[in-house]
Amino acid sequence: MSGETFFIVVFAAFLHALWNAIVKGAGDRTLVLGLVASGHVVPGCVLIYLYGMPDRAAFPYIVATTVIHWGYYILLNMAYRTGDLSVVYPIARGFAPVLIALGAVIWADEYLPLTAWIGVFAVSGGIMLLASEAFASRAARSGLVAAVGLAAVIASYSIVDGIGIRVSNNPGSYIGWIFAAEIFVVLYVFGTRWSRFRAMSSKAIWIGLTGGIVSGAAYGLVLLAKTTAPLGIVSALRETSVIFAALIGVLWFAEGPRGSRIIAAVVVAAGVALSVGARV
């Protein structure tokens, strides 16, 4: 992995943690997720205008990821309704690197060296340490289940998009089409909750739209990285977002405890170093 790709993915990780914090701190999360989707649609249309059509082989992947992202929004809303950001987010992201690396072997024919596998498992293990209190507690069990479901959904769309953007032969167009396809989410959310949307403050609307632009930038950067680097390693590096999420959870939402989360962050960082430093 080149240094440029490394910094792109780490920056994307920070942006991803930031937009999740925006959703967690929102009053009406369903409407905010609709606004997030809106923040994807407009840039998506601009990208389509600039880059045109991807190769025909990409369209089954565009349809698949659109459907999978519906599940993602539903589960994300459920998880943040009942769980802390610094618990839900690590669980959702913790399972994903291993699932993506395994899926890449099956569907993308990508085989990582042993050192990279150790790094991927270390990243997942460190992330799960961040959420260890959730497994020991019976509180917010529905949020825990939703977070585990999120991990499976994240792995699914990560693999689909990782392959789809490669076969598209036009990364800008592929990103544009998957973003523009979220118009169906927008129409559903606001079509069924229009009166609630009209009652939202302009500040809340701008926060939601900003979250959409931030999340779109984060995912677009990750997809670009997947055109040149293995899916499993990009995923492991992307999960440095949990470090940012833990810091945001502690400093912004006053969540704790701090000590175990610092240790877990060190484990994640070590896993990332092993993954990125491995020769692929």
Image (cartoon, rainbow, N blue to C red):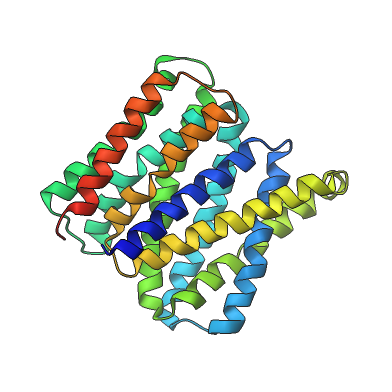
Q: In which quadrant of the rendered view does residue 225 lie? A: bottom left
Residue 19 visible within the image? yes
Indicate whether 51 appears above or below 101. below
> Nearest the camera: 7 or 111?
7
The reply to whether residue 84 is visible in this rendering is no
Residue 271 falls in which quadrant of the image?
top left
The relative height of residue 273 versus residue 27 in the rendered view (above or below) is below
Residue 178: name its quadrant. bottom right
- Which residue is farthest left? 114
Q: Is residue 239 left or right of residue 70?
A: left
Quarter of the figure with the N terminus:
bottom left
Comparing 188 with 110, the one in front is 110
What residue appears at the point 87 percent right and 46 percent down from the top-left corner? Answer: 195
Q: Quadrant of the C terminus?
A: bottom left
Q: Position of residue 199 (x, y in %)?
A: 88, 44
Residue 103: give x, y in percent of width and height: 28, 54
Q: Could you say where residue 145 lies in the image, as x and y percent from the top left?
A: 47, 30
Q: Residue at x 18, y 46 (%)?
A: 117
Identify the residue at image location x=37%, y=21%.
260
**Above/below status of 253 relative to 197:** above
For residue 161, side relative to residue 143 (left or right): left
